[in-house]
Amino acid sequence: MNDISYLMLRLVAGISFLGHGLVRLPKLTAFSQWMIETFSKSMLPQSLISPFSYILPVAEFTIGILLILGIFSPKVIIAGFVVMIILMFGTCLIENWEALPSQMMHAIILVVLYQFISANSISLDQFFKK
């Protein structure tokens, strides 16, 4: 994978994470209430859903910014993958099969980014190495 292709793939993932977090942050309480209601009939207790619903938009926003900038890339990619695994698990528990392909695509993009991390030359990681 060449450096430009890697940058484009990193930006695609970053913009998606950033966008998800950005639109949820201003309406955090409403998003949390929606998530609690959505998972009310799942086997997950509200004591897990409520804190996660507040953490998720912040995590998405932060991961998005860091991916776009290309800073702390290996750790950020792993963090993004962990977020996607948690989301996929929750999606399966509520049988929201329509959302699963998008989440899987995000996870696959993150795996590819991690696999080819040596192509991450157009990034703040490389700038700070010098």
Image (tube, rainbow, N blue to C red):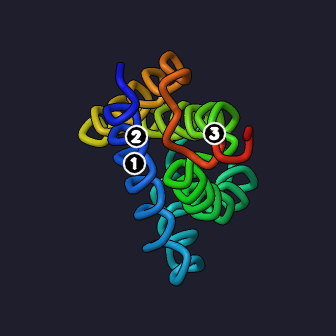
Picture residue at 73% right of the left edge, 46% below the top? 128
The extreme bottom residue here reads 26
In front of the other: 22 or 88: 22
Picture residue at 46% right of the left edge, 34% below the top? 88
From mark 2 to mark 3, how far is it between C-alphas? 12 Å
From mark 3 to mark 1, how far is it between C-alphas? 16 Å
Question: Badge 2 local density, few (<14 within 10 Å), some, or many (20+)?
Answer: many
Q: Which residue is mark 1?
A: 11
Question: Badge 1 local density, few (<14 within 10 Å), some, or many (20+)?
Answer: some
The label on residue 126 is 3
Q: Quadrant of the C terminus?
A: top right
**Is residue 95 at all visible to an observer of this figure?**
no
Q: Disc 1 residue type?
A: Leu
Q: Which residue is mark 2?
A: 7
Residue 5: give x, y in percent of width and height: 31, 32
Question: Badge 3 local density, few (<14 within 10 Å), some, or many (20+)?
Answer: few
Element under disc 1: helix
Q: Quadrant of residue 54?
A: bottom right
Q: Is mark 2 in CB contact (under 8 Å) with mark 1?
A: yes
Picture residue at 63% right of the left edge, 55% below the top? 59
